[in-house]
Amino acid sequence: AHCINFFDTAESYGFGIAETLLGRAIKELNCDREDLVISTKLYQVGFAPNDKMLSRKHLVEGMRNSLDRLQLEYVDIVFCHRPDSQTPLEETCRAMDWLIEEGYAFYWATSEWSADMIKRAIEICTRLKLHKPIADQCQYNALTRENAEKNFRELYEDYRYGTTVWS
């Protein structure tokens, strides 16, 4: 029998409530963690200065808070929910690598980043020997197709970059 095993959430969905509900559902269903693929996204959970963006401080604290809400020790994928022009990209890459090295996530990914920004992140990670992002979550529907079909083609072909879509 086939079943749904991929669940995607974000710290911003309901200001953390979606993560709390997903964590509760996983516990109540008594699912084997190894059978599930759980992802969450970090970028903004509130409006205070440390509640948003992709700084090391927010990424580390945001990941810990997300895991508490999810009642999990780790997620399979943690996404940078949106690009951040205020935080140096190297700082974000180093912080995402740290989350993986500490066991908070197996992989990191991007969401709604430009192809150029993703390439720059991959280049930084390659140069610094950090874990590279593996996929982007882009908008994709009948009216919005350009990123997935055109702009990311080089990422898919040259970097074996993956995707999961929204909307």
Image (cartoon, grey):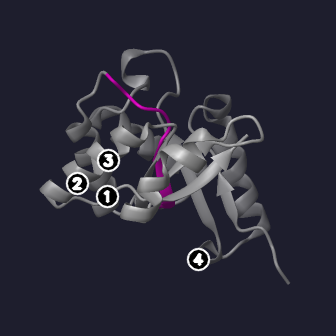
Q: Residue at x 71, y 72 (%)?
A: 31
What residue is pinned by disc 1? Answer: 132
Q: CA distance from mark 2 to mark 4?
A: 28 Å
Which residue, as the protein is rendered here, is positioned at the far left? 128
What residue is pinned by disc 2? Answer: 125
- Looking at the figure, which quarter contains the N terminus? bottom right
- State which tag comes first along the sequence, 3 or 2: 3
Residue 161's place in the image compared with 109, above or below, is below
> Whole-percent x and y of residue 43?
46, 32
Helix or strand or loop: what does disc 4 sit on? helix
Crowd class of label 3 (few under 14; some 14 to 19; many from 20; radius 10 Å)? some
> Whole-percent x and y of residue 158?
37, 63
Which residue, as the protein is rendered here, is positioned at the far top? 48
User: Does any portion of residue 164 appear in the rendered image?
Assistant: yes
* Circle 2: residue type: Cys
> Whole-percent x and y of residue 107?
42, 61
